[in-house]
Image: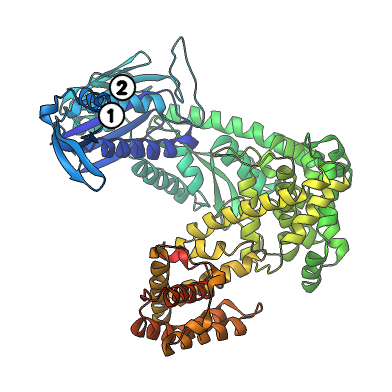
Amino acid sequence: MADFLLELLMEEIPSRFQDMASIHLKNKLIKSLQEEKLSFNSLETYITPRRLVAYIQGLPEKKKDIQERRKGPRVDAPEKAIKGFLKSLNLELTDCKQETMQKGVFWVVDVLQKGKPTACILENIIKDILETFSWPKSMRWGNKMGKWIRPLRNMIAIFDGKVLDIEWNGVKSSNKTQGHRILFPNFFKVDSWKSYKDGLQKRQVILNKKDKIERIYKGIEALAKESNTTVYKADRLVNEVAGLVEYPWFLKGTFDKNFLKLPVEALETTMRVHQRYFLLYKAGKPSTSFVVVTNMPTDDKYIENTMREGNEKVLKARLEDASFYWKLDQKTALSEFSLKLKERLFHKELGTMWQKKERLEKLIVCSSLLDYLKENKINKEEAQKAAELCKADLCTGMVAEFPELQGIMGGYYACLEGYSKLISKAISEHYSPTGTEEFCPEKPLSVILSLVDKIDTLLGFFAIELEPTGSKDPFALRRAALGLLRLTLNNGLDFNLKPLLEKAYSLYVDQGLVKKGNIETCMKKVQTFLSERLRYYFKDKGHNHKVIEGVLAKGSQHSIVRVEADLKAIENFLKTEKGALLLQNYRRVSNILRAKKHKVASNFWQEDKLGEKAEKELLSAVKNFEQEAKEDQTIEQQLDSLTFLQKPIDQFFEDILVNDPDEDKKNNRFLLLAKVQRAFDKNLSFSSLVG
């Protein structure tokens, strides 16, 4: 058994693409090796800012020989067909033998496929991966034809201690690589995984990202501890910074305390988003200290001080910009900023941000939402004022300079102008949630304002047929749909979404932006899209995928909260003994109906042909179930009523021969079982559970 080491050394890979690249390489290698029927003991991939690495252990030196039986034409087939078969395998007819099969006598031959050396197979696999690797963005450089995320500079490809013969885009595989770009630029020789890993470690490159992340956490905590401070919510930034440095060093800087007058979000955005600095907190409030993770050593005091001064100078300039706009924006009322929305485009086919604002003002007070707001003691005027001002901060200097603060700054400015905390909070939170784990609003006005904003966006882009396709989603509609679902489920908004969707569409029609006649098509697309997002959301939450399919197969479900309730109820029911037995009986009914040789027309039904006691009792039980089933029954009640079919079904299968010699009896028994199946599927698509 032998090992294989692959390293692709390139210019700096954007941090946001690194984890995806490591997973993608691993999946492609596994798939390729499986297709080649090459076994291996383990396969791991690694990623650093400049290198993509794979290490495979336990590969055979040569692929096994495979004996395959090839089926040719029938013995009485035209001579041309037989010759073609022989030519494709470079055989003579005497090499073949005749074999009797269901459809006649055929020529067959046992062919021995000699296994190729693993080295040759790996060469082809790596060349194919280099040609087909999928990056979110790719580039060409020089006069090279191949595309890659950044220019490829070097390649290691060593199998069983020997360099493989691979060349791509002018880069030929070797057994040499670099360490840290600046500290150890000279190439060093590699002959094994151990020498490669140890060589990088000595040359200031941490290969394993988890080890690097651990070092970053420890380094930040050590500096924070010196001043009795701490860092908050650092996971995402730590992961990003780990993709920027090959070996992390640390230094602590400070900034003027006057900048603490800025909103904490402005401080965080300036440091985290724009500079990748870690703001330190003391007693829950921002301190004047921050930590920088650098790719260069900070052991030398002169170098450390020089780097600190440089970073503090850059940060000071950024914070001065933020402070300038913070003060400047407060001289203008939000209502005046809102007027400037007439000059800002939402989308060239969907009008201006002012028109979007007008739609939100009307959508937020439609009947179902207004009832919800009233229940939570929020009046119509408050809701409309929040909708009127929610987009105003897009025209402020602060948001122009720091787009990540949209909504948040509007909330601050509304509060400073004397608007209620309710309105201010709704404005600041209406873009949330932005993902599966991010903050989700809970205050009623915040929830509804965020909801209508996402509904308006979804309906608009679907109305002009700019829905997501494949992996492309330029208008973040998947995120909007996920946000809508989370808002609904997290806050138990048990109302029909369809009237809201229709109202949102009609508001676009009123503004002359979309055609009235396309509403049905648009509604269907949006509801299908939401159903798909709901499927992914439930899967991500760990629900049984078969039950998910069963619930969603029931058709259009306008109350998403009830869909979730049904899902949980069915999962809990199927975990009980009653549920397991019921599913077992459905599977038996389903298998019998699927296996029947011919289809029986439903109008063939002749109830008088059911003469046996067991079949009469089963029919009676089905009729009782259908009569008692009501629209307003909970899913628990419906499932519970299904359990009354359990005993008559058991008795039916014990006493009755479905495939009776009497054709009429047999057909009517099939139709009876079809009625049983429909009774099950009235509550849930049980077929999805047995598929």
Contact, CB < 8 Å: mark 1 with mark 2? yes
Identify which residue is drawn at 38% across, 15% down: 169
User: What label does residue 587 carry, if any?
Assistant: none
Label 1, on which residue? 6
- SS of the residue at dot 2? strand
Instruction: Please tell me whether residue 585 is drawn above or below residue 180 in the rendered image.
Output: below
Query: Is residue 492 positioned above or below 69 on the image?
Result: below
For residue 561, what is the image quadrant?
bottom right
User: Residue placed at 44% from the left, 84% from the top?
Assistant: 615
The amino acid type of the residue labelled 2 equals Met
**Is residue 237 shown left or right of residue 445?**
left
Q: Nearer the viewer, residue 500 or 620?
A: 620
The residue that mark 2 highlights is: 155
Residue 282 is situated, as x and y percent measured from the top left of the image, at: 56, 54
* Disc 2: CA contacts within 10 A as few (<14), some (14-19) or many (>=20): many
From the viewer's perspective, tell me whether residue 267 is left or right of residue 303: right
Residue 64 appears anywhere in the view: no
